[in-house]
Amino acid sequence: MKITCIGAGYVGGPTMAVIAAKCPDIEVTIVDINPKRIAEWNDEDLSKLPVYEPGLAEVVKEARNRNLFFSTDVNKGIRNADIIFISVNTPTKTYGIGKNMAADLKFVELCARQIANNAEGNKIVVEKSTLPVRTAESIKTILSNNSNGLKFQVLSNPEFLAEGTAIQDLFNPDRVLIGGDMTPEGLEAIETLTAVYARWVPRERILQTNVWSSELSKLTANAFLAQRISSINSISALCERTGADVDEIARAIGADSRIGHKFLKASVGYGGSCFQKDLLNLVYLCRHFNLPEVADYWEQVIKMNDYQKRRFSQQIIDSLFNTVSGKKIAFLGWAFKKDTNDTRESAAIYVADDLMQDRAQIHIYDPKVSAERVYEDLEYLQSHRRNSGGCECMGEPLSKEEIHSLVTVHTEPYETLKDAHAIAVLTEWDEFCTYDWNKIYQDMYKPAFVFDGRNILNAKQLRGIGFEVKRIGK
């Protein structure tokens, strides 16, 4: 068997690497039109992989050039494959009908047309990207109308990976979901893909459904997880007004077996590539199918997350005597969570933007995120604001020159923190807890503020040193 995955990003790369490692007799090829990304996957220096994920380098090292290959020749990959995974980006639309809510499926459609134009035999095509319900129908329509007598089966196999633990999740998943047509040919295709995963995943964890249920299950799973985060964050705001402790509340309600403890960690807000995008997509679908009450319900989850980020920014401004103009605010962390270099929808981007509107000097350190990525994130946000004619964020769009004059990215933490008026912890990297906070205090302006957006630091110890410490929900 030969498998090709179109898309060498955060989903396609790790998923295919694990399939190759677990199935050494299956030839796995990951193709991407970005030559720089493919070169990084092929680099002998495994620290240069484009995706940082604990354990990924070891898996790639085991399988690469044995039965795992990376290439820019998409057409050849399509011709050679028995199973083709589509794992390309599906961003939120920034134009036209569904702007700022619906998923932009242009890359998926291009993949479908490229598969139809280059296939030389019957294929199983697998949706791996997160897609709206009924996308498989669109793919099937394109393939069937350009089939040249070939037969295609389209399956939905959504990913449920948590960045930072993706390799562990792939090795030992809670479940693998495979959806397809409930026809003899569709069931046969489902079983073919099931047999691949069954090499290491117990069969009882491989769920087989119709294709529509599979597609909607992915959106629903992310919506429920985001809802839990927004729910505990809403309570954190109440805790700060009443003197309650949000961590104690989370522990108390999490002890209820009907609720459980996962995703009840209050913070500055959720981020990542999926939650915001999938919730917006779900809201759009509900409005499209004339379900306004359902749409309003899920849209509130997004509004609460936006509120939490703005609330954090405003607390910094209020605490620093109602202005941060010209003041150095040091950010610890830029990735949306620890153990990843993914910054998509990171809370840090929006907190920085709020403070830059007041002309704060932002100094940033993240152990895995490059300066290039930081500036791209901020410039993209300003571009999005301009194209949208304004957004929910305050203030006018900043120019590229203004961003570079207000933001400095460091490769060393202590220089980042030196002479700062305040420190904002935006990512829960473990190393931040190991710093010499006595030294940091001595080198800061007084009063020295720490705004712990992840509640990871020892507040009692920091207050003993002399810091003014502000935490979420405390």
Image (spheres, rainbow, N blue to C red):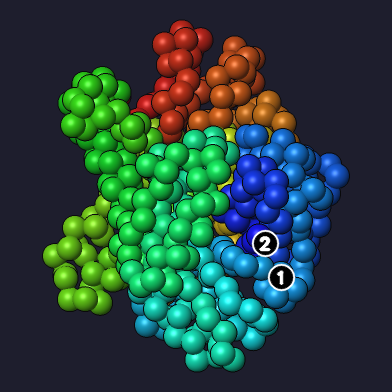
Q: Is residue 423 left or right of residue 17?
A: left
Residue sticking out furthest to the right: 44
Look at the picture and state if 248 lies above or below 271.
above
Q: Position of residue 334 (x, y in %)?
A: 57, 42
Q: Mark 2 sits on what residue?
A: 2
Residue marked by disc 1: 80
Residue 102 in percent (x, y) is at: 38, 72
Quadrant containing the N terminus in the rendered view = bottom right
Q: Secondary structure at mark 1?
A: helix
Q: Quadrant of residue 218?
A: bottom left
What x and y, as percent, mark residue 89? 55, 65
The answer to whether residue 176 shows anywhere in this view is: yes
| Residue at x-position 20% and y-position 27% | 257
384 and 176: which one is in front?
176
**How many dots with numbers?**
2
Residue 13 on image: x %, y %: 64, 52
Q: Sequence order check: which comes first, mark 2 or mark 1?
A: 2
Q: Residue furthest left?
A: 293
In terms of depth relative to the viewer, which is nearer, 399 or 298? 298
The residue under the point 56% across, 24% down is 430
* Tag 2 near tag 1, CB within 8 Å: yes
Q: CA distance from mark 2 to mark 1?
A: 7 Å
Q: Where is the C terminus found, in terms of image quarters?
A: top left
Position of 122 with respect to 47 (left or right) is left
